[in-house]
Amino acid sequence: MKRAATMSALVCLLALTAAAPAAPSSPSARESAKYTYNKYTYKGTLLDSVPKKGVLKVCTTGDYAPFTKLDPADGTYTGVDIDMARDLAKSLDAKPKFVATTWANLTKDVASRRCDIGVGGVSITLPRARQVYFSEPTREDGKTPVVRCADKDKFGAGTLADIDKPGTTVIVNPGGTNEQFARTHIKQATVKLHPENTTIFQEIIDGRADVMMTDASETLYQSKIHPELCSLHPEKPFTFSEKAYATPRGDEEFQEYVDQFVHLAKHDGTYAKYEAEWMK
């Protein structure tokens, strides 16, 4: 009888415990949570810390119009993704602080928390995805050639076989997917590195290079502002890629928020409006 009474009391206690409402998770507990990536240990989520600090640190190269463009005269950034970054910061009750980076270092800078997000025509790749999280894609893209219009017939249908010939100079900017693509596919033509992406298309116009293979969006933009240049088959690029924003690994809450921000901007016309301002 005594054992039965004890068991009955235990069952009642367990039932009461199960029925009790769960204690709400306190913000302090969430903010004190830590995660580690490589040698870096971080506390809390950017979803909380950015509004508290009032600053969103945005890494961008500034050399990839129409997505990111730096004006060296006054140090201001413009572009489709720059406008988006300003909107993202505003949604977090913060101001954007643009941090200069390079294509070789962009994902490293995001991973090490030198900045909170990386923007500016960043293509999703598996090696990059090992270092950072990526948001919902902003647009599809792919590598396509841009050449002098005067030499357009020289490259026929603009296939890799038409381009990869002795005597042809393919120019690339270092450290990004353009160089990776050229190094992988160009075997007979000369590959020429040019460190300044902002002046690289002038090299083609002036005859110091013949071809650049970059994202179709960039070839269309450059051919718009430089009538001497023609984009070859931008509607059928060599590759498939998507562009997105990079966020630090381990911070799922911030990454999910950026996902929702991009999703809404793509479906309410915001992203299309910013892109049209550059591509019209």
Image: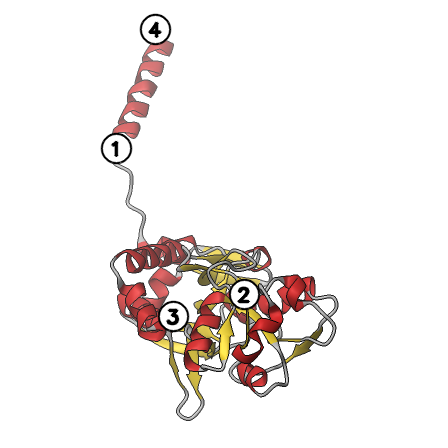
User: Of tags 1 and 4, which is closer to the observer?
Assistant: 1
Residue at 58% across / 85% down in the picture? Answer: 203
Which mark is first along the chain, 4 or 3?
Answer: 4
* Pointer 3 residue: 81
Residues marked 1 and 2 touching at CB (< 8 Å): no
Real-space Cα separation, disc 3 to disc 4, in angstroms: 74 Å
* Pointer 4 residue: 1
Please name whichever residue, 41 or 97, is drawn nearer the observer in this view of the structure. Answer: 97
Amino acid at dot 2: Thr
Crowding at dot 1, Cα within 10 Å, few <14 / some 14-19 / many 20+, comes out as few
Secondary structure state at the residue bearing disc 3:
helix
* Pointer 1 residue: 20
* Pointer 2 residue: 144
Left or right, 192 with reference to 266: right
Real-space Cα separation, disc 1 to disc 2, in angstroms: 62 Å
Which mark is first along the chain, 4 or 1?
Answer: 4
> Can you give x and y, in whole percent of width and height, for residue 52 in the image?
31, 69
Amino acid at dot 1: Ala
> Can you give x and y, in whole percent of width and height, for residue 99 in the image?
45, 78
Amino acid at dot 3: Asp
Label drawn at residue 250: none
Q: Indicate how the structure is coloured in the image.
A: secondary structure
User: Of tags 3 and 2, which is closer to the observer?
Assistant: 2
35 over 63 or under it: above or below: above
Residues marked 1 and 3 touching at CB (< 8 Å): no
User: Of tags 3 and 4, which is closer to the observer?
Assistant: 3
Which mark is first along the chain, 3 or 1?
Answer: 1
User: Of tags 1 and 2, which is closer to the observer?
Assistant: 2
Left or right, 3 with reference to 132: left
Please name whichever residue, 231 or 150, is drawn nearer the observer in this view of the structure. Answer: 150
